[in-house]
Amino acid sequence: MINIIWVVLFVLGMVYAAFNGTIDAVNRAIFKSASEAVAICIGLVSVLIFWLGLMKIAEKSGLLNKLSSLFKPIMQRIFPEVPPTHPAMGYILSNTIANLFGLGNAATPMGIKAMEQLKKLNGGSDKPSRSMITLLALNTSGMTLIPTTVIGIRMQYKSASPTDIVGPTLIATLCTTLAAILIDRFFYYQRKKRGRK
Amino acid sequence: MGLVTALSVWMVPVLIGVILVYGTLKKVPAYESFVEGGKEGFSLAVSIMPFLVGMLTAVGVFRASGAMDALIDFIRPLLTYIGMPAEVVPLALLRPISGTGALGLMSDLLSEYGPDSFIGHLASVMQGSMDTTFYVVTVYFGAVGIHKIGDALKVGLLADLVGVISSVVIVTLIFS
């Protein structure tokens, strides 16, 4: 899908330019955008090194594990079909905490491990169980405490206050996550009403 | 509103403080661990580079040709009365499909309208509060061999819609 969108952006732009005499601007945009993208990434190096460095301390000190035990009671309510001591619960918690701290690279393997365990719980069926859909809902709602990449890019464009979006983003993320959980519940009860699991 | 501003200002320093103090109390060599973890930062930034170059050039061509403005003018009448700027619609549509693609579009919006403009704030909040639904569904279910996705995609996309709406409402309340 992203392949088609990408090509369509180029082709539509070029066709539009041909009819509107903006082809010079298009030529300039190609090279300006490419070098701008590289500059942004270089600018992100500082933020990412700092954040990942801090996260290493949080991980080694056991702070992340500590937080997952705080989240456990909430998660048990969100995933009523997963036994609290099952390994699936552990992976679900690690996945959630990694997402919360913006560690996308660590979150994905944990999420996949959680899915494997949930599949076992579901008797190896190739249909998604209730808990699997809930885990996806949580992961697609983008919960983050601090959107580090966004802050980094705002710095690149000389924002007067790059972090002023942290509070609003947190509130928006909470709304989205809450909505994801409620919508997930709604569909679950719909399925139950129709008599299939 | 003052509370949200305070949250924005204090969140990062407080979190850093908590991590450093907790680590030291647990006898973790803080500075050495920081350096060790930080090494991954450079390669992570470099690994985003090709995605961002690809997406920013495509968006740059689309915008420079005038097609972006034509598209925005076309959808504007539908959105003005709910208070959502048409400029962020492409971002809202791309966000569930491609994370780095959306990052490219967000950068483009920040450079075009300024990071501290209403559109700049809205684009930043939208980018930070939604996730790549299609990617998550494909990767997570694909990895364990689930071929029927059930209600998962519907739930994810509806949650994204809530994300767009709540971003608009919250940014309007706080920044305008």
Image: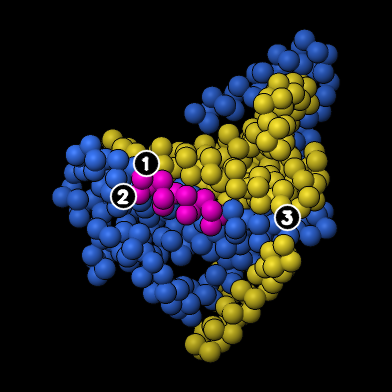
Residue type at mark 1 is Ala
**Which numbered disc covers residue A132?**
2
- Left or right of residue A14: residue B92: left
Q: Is residue A23 above or below residue B118?
A: above
Is residue A169 visible in the rendered image? The answer is yes
Chain coloured yellow in this rendering: B
* Residue at the far top in the pictured view: A19
Q: Secondary structure at mark 3?
A: helix
Q: Chain of mark 3?
A: B
Q: Please give the range of residues in magenta.
A: A173-186
Q: Are marks 1 and 2 on the same chain?
A: no
Q: Chain of mark 2?
A: A
Q: Which residue is mark 1?
A: B152
Report which colour depicts chain A.
blue
Is residue B49 visible in the rendered image? The answer is no
**Which numbered disc covers residue A25?**
none
